[in-house]
Amino acid sequence: MKKLLSIFTLMLATLSVSAASTRTTKPERSNLYEKVPMEGSYVGYVSIETNSPGYFGTGGFNGGITTAHGKMVTRNIFLGLGTGYIADFAKGKGVIPVFADFRYFFQSQFQRRIYPHIGLRGGAAVATVGKAGGMGQAAIGFRVPLSEKLALNLEVGPQYSTFFDQEVIVGSPNYAIDAKWKSAGARFSFFGRLSIEF
């Protein structure tokens, strides 16, 4: 009887200690909104972009779609390549940017749902009508995870575009060979971009 009573007392003490530890231990937070891409993982972006006055300097609405694809080199650094189509809808002009994309994400235990970041894009802009040239963007933005594989990114910043055009050589029988590229100017503007990350 004494053995049975001591076993019962021991079991009761064990249960009470277990219950106390359960009360003092906080449940683990869901990782759904803390998800960041792992080092070495693929990341892609599809973006809607607007530029003012944009690549064309007409003062009208310039906008389009861009996409970038690459890898997380570290937990903070994304490197990738991208392209897209940006149009001046009033003038019927467009460019196809081809660029390198860099993003640096700031992470902290206090920033569980919003991750601020900075970014750079640089490359060439191939014209569909008229001019071609180079482009560069500097961005500041933030990332909001939607699930373990999807996130929204909002970015704004300055943009610098240069343009080159071919000289018209009157009477040249070999225009495509004899034509020379000359500088047609540069424009400073601002852009806004909303991206889906996957």
Image (spheres, grey):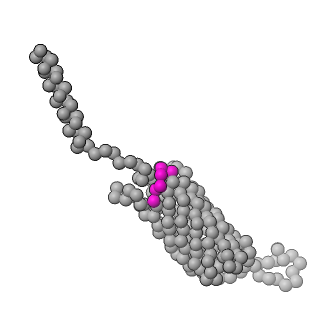
Q: Is residue 68 visible?
A: yes
Of 47 and 71, nearer the camera is 47
Q: Residue at x 22, y 39 (%)?
A: 21
Vertically, is 57 above or below 83?
below
For residue 132, what is the image quadrant?
bottom right
Q: Which residue is drawn at the image coordinates 51% and 54% (left, top)? A: 150
Please give the count of numbered marks on the rendered protein: 0
Q: Is residue 109 left or right of residue 61?
A: left
Work out whether residue 164 can be spotted: no
Magenta stretch: helix, strand or loop mostly: loop
On screen, residue 7 versus residue 177, left or right, reads: left
Q: Is residue 145 magenta?
A: yes
The answer to whether residue 30 is magenta is no
Q: Which residues are magenta?
A: 144-149
Point out residue 37 in the picture as x, y percentages from the top left corner: 48, 52
Q: Residue, x 47% and y 69% (percent of image)? A: 140
Q: x, y (%) of residue 3?
A: 13, 16
Q: Residue at x 75, y 79 (%)?
A: 166
